[in-house]
Amino acid sequence: MTEDDLSAVIEIEQKSFSSPWSRRTFHEGLSAKYPHAHFLVCKHQDNSIAYINFVLVGEDCHITNLAVALDFRRLGVAKYMLAKSLDQIKYLGGRKVFLEVRMSNIVAQRLYRQFGFRINSIRKKYYSDNDEDAYVLWLEDIRKIRLEYVNEKLQG
Ligand SMILES: CC(C)(COP(=O)(O)OP(=O)(O)OC[C@H]1O[C@@H](n2cnc3c(N)ncnc32)[C@H](O)[C@@H]1OP(=O)(O)O)[C@@H](O)C(=O)NCCC(=O)NCCS
């Protein structure tokens, strides 16, 4: 992701979340201030249609954001981005991957479950817009999952 992607990314962000990240948050994440932050976009005909953000420190990785533009959902884009990101995280030395997801976000939970993420704990009232609890999902060791299989399936 670069500054040029931000208009499209922010539009997706605002349509996807009840408490969207601000332009400033994306802007700072891209800056040298946060060397552990990775911001990736997926493009279709030069337009940004999805993005994923993660923070990797040593072996621990926190997936902080993932969204797909409304018109491109249910096409396997999130699966593709997650598979590519886990590949990259593995390559960069990551092992444990975790993220928070709203308890009501069954769609995202189904996606993560397919990659082996499991509930580790619950963060009470994690989301301040409606006091919703979060599941903390963990993938204990990405070296043990067969990402090649996921990638093959997506290309097929
Ligand atoms: C969650 C999200 C990223 C999924 O993106 P997507 O590109 O549509 O997902 P994919 O097409 O790759 O589907 C992956 C899996 O997610 C699940 N899924 C996706 N859309 C679904 C839907 N409408 N109903 C049920 N399950 C769904 C399925 O398990 C699917 O696998 P399958 O096709 O083998 O059944 C997208 O819906 C989104 O941007 N939502 C708003 C933002 C958000 O909730 N982000 C996650 C924050 S933790």
Image: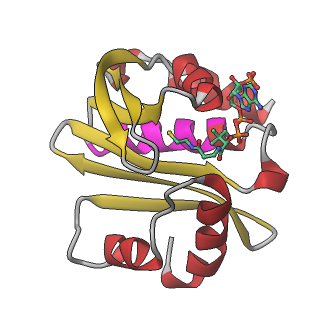
| Whether residue 2 is visible | yes
Which quarter of the picture shows residue 152?
Answer: top right
- Residue at image position (30%, 17%) is 120
Picture coordinates of residue 76, whole percent (x, y): 74, 37
Q: Which residues are magenta?
A: 79-92
Residue at the limit of the structure toward the bottom, as seen here: 4
| Whether residue 42 is visible | no
Vertical order, 75 against 57 (above or below) = above
- Residue at image position (60%, 51%) is 67
Picture coordinates of residue 82, whole percent (x, y): 54, 39
Which quarter of the picture shows residue 131?
Answer: top left
- Residue at image position (32%, 76%) is 28
Quadrant in which ligand 1 is drawn: top right
Foreground residue, 80 or 74?
A: 74
Q: Quadrant of the C terminus?
A: top right
What secondary structure characterizes most of the magenta part? helix
Give left or right: position of 140 versus 51: left
Vertical order, 135 against 74 (above or below) = above
Foreground residue, 42 or 152?
A: 42
- Residue at image position (61%, 21%) is 110
Colour option used: secondary structure
Q: Is residue 80 magenta?
A: yes
Which quarter of the picture shows residue 138?
Answer: top left
Residue at the limit of the structure toward the left, as seen here: 58
Give left or right: position of 102 versus 58: right
